[in-house]
Image (tube, grey):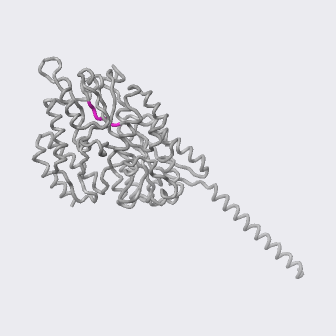
């Protein structure tokens, strides 16, 4: 082989090598662009609010389909059939194994623990870049806040409201209460309503059903703990006043156990009901009547001070795993679930709670939906729901809150049943403070 031939051969080999490198580069780029990326989603089946739900996966499947259409190289998968009761254990096991989903639902009672243990990714950097938090109702948004950090976005809320038997109040010549009514008005109406109507000496008409210590404490805007969760305040004038209201309401009925059957039969004026309960309400006996035989309306809960935040609100949340390797995609999917108006509108139409977005709850679609429900066009309005969501309270955010609150609830309920609450509050406060130390 001559020197010239060798030179030409080297040039050919070099050119082949360059073309091979280019081909490999193109293949790598192509493969990276179209290689399937899997995002794991953690969800439970059924409603977050303990009511029947026939559309378990309808919304989530729709959102997944929309997301995958826009991201053809992404596949979102989830394990179906996990009940809400089993979900916390399922998620805990995944976290312990280091296999938690990229995005997952958080029942509100689990949020404080998960946020305080480093499991959840901090969302503030993502929110600051491309999400206006003011689109959400403040209380719903703060449900996903721990300390000064946002760890989750709200997905659906469930406010408590007061449902009123309009026919019963009209029969007794009592005007319907209006938004901003007080606990004194509430008690006075209950006192007028509760009586023996047929003269047999037995009370058979009642002011209220289901108004318990939690509703009363919310009405008085009671703060049971300091922000750090190191001190409890049960033995206070506000708490005593709130629990005194519960006792007085109980005494009106002469200790008769007012039941849902009584409400269904039109014998009860007031019934605190969550939005989810309202939207799925079917009275007893189901086979006789699908809906109640009396007209009713729903307004905000009464309060000791109408200018204070007093609506009880539960909120389901979605968060990202701190360990996800696909944080950008996970964030985009999280926004589509929680901050997208179309998704949230569909959720309000097919689920039982309220949207966490102000624009959805005030939309014409939501207005039409409520006007066309089975309870009448004025039973519940978008203005009422919007006002309730704006006045919602935020539960304390410290690690042991849910455990402590559950114990406090047990002690208060027991004391109310035994009619010893006045003497027990100081002991309850001491016992809870001992738990907080």
**Corner quadrant of residue 19:** bottom right
Q: Quadrant of the C terminus?
A: bottom left
The picture places residue 246, in percent across and down from the top left corner, at 18, 38
Looking at the picture, how far across and down is residue 50, in whole percent? 35, 38
Q: From what the image shows, is residue 160 above or below residue 88?
A: above
Q: Nearer the viewer, residue 286 or 38?
A: 286
Q: For residue 53, which quarter of the picture?
A: top left
- Tell me, yes or no, whether the highlighted magenta stretch contains residue 330: no
- Whether residue 330 can be seen here: no
The residue lying furthest to the bottom in this view is 3
Please state the horizontal and vertical placement of residue 322, each as a whole percent of the image. 44, 60
Which quadrant would residue 352 be assigned to in this image? Answer: top left
Question: In the image, residue 166 lies at what x, y percent?
Answer: 30, 25
Magenta range is: 270-274
Residue lying at 27% horizontally and 38% vertically, measured from the top left: 302
Q: Magenta segment, principal secondary structure?
A: strand
Residue located 47% across and 42% down the image: 359
């Amino acid at each position: 082989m001559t020197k010239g031939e060798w030179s030409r051969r080297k040039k050919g080999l070099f050119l082949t090598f360059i073309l091979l490198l280019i081909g490999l580069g193109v293949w790598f780029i192509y493969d990276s662009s179209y290689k399937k990326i899997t995002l794991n989603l953690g969800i439970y089946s059924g409603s977050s609010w303990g009511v029947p739900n026939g559309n378990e996966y309808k919304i989530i499947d729709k959102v997944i389909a929309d997301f995958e259409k826009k991201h053809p190289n992404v596949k979102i998968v989830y394990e179906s059939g996990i009940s809400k009761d089993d979900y916390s254990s399922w998620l805990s096991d995944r976290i312990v194994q280091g296999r938690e989903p990229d995005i997952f639902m958080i029942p509100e009672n689990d949020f404080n623990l998960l946020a305080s243990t480093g499991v959840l990714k901090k969302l503030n950097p993502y929110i600051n870049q491309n999400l206006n938090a003011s689109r959400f109702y403040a209380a719903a948004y703060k449900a996903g806040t721990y300390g000064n950090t946002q760890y989750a976005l709200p997905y659906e809320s469930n406010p408590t409201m007061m449902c009123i038997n309009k026919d019963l109040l009209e029969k007794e010549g009592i005007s319907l209460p209006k938004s901003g009514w007080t606990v004194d008005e509430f008690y006075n109406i209950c006192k007028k309503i509760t009586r023996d109507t047929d003269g047999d000496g037995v009370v058979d008409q009642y002011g209220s059903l289901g108004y318990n210590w939690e509703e009363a404490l919310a009405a008085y805007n009671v703060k049971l703990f300091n922000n750090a969760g190191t001190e409890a305040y049960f033995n206070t004038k506000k708490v005593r006043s709130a629990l005194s209201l519960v006792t007085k309401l109980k005494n009106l009925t002469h200790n008769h156990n007012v039941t849902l059957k009584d409400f269904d039969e039109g014998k009860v004026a007031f019934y605190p009901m969550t939005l989810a309960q309202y939207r799925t309400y079917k009275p007893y006996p189901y086979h006789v009547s699908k809906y109640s035989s009396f007209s009713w309306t729903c307004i905000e809960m009464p309060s000791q001070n109408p200018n204070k935040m007093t609506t009880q609100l539960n909120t389901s949340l979605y968060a990202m795993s701190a360990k996800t390797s696909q944080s950008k995609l996970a964030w985009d999917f999280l926004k589509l679930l929680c901050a997208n108006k179309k998704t949230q509108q569909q959720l309000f139409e097919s689920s039982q709670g309220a949207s966490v977005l102000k624009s959805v709850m005030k939309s014409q679609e939501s207005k039409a939906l409520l006007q066309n429900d089975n309870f009448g066009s004025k039973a519940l309005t978008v203005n009422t729901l919007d006002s309730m969501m704006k006045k919602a309270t935020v539960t304390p955010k410290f690690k042991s809150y849910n455990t402590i609150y559950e114990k406090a609830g047990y002690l208060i309920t027991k004391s109310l049943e035994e009619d010893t609450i006045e003497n027990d509050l100081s002991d309850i406060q001491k016992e809870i403070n001992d738990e907080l130390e």
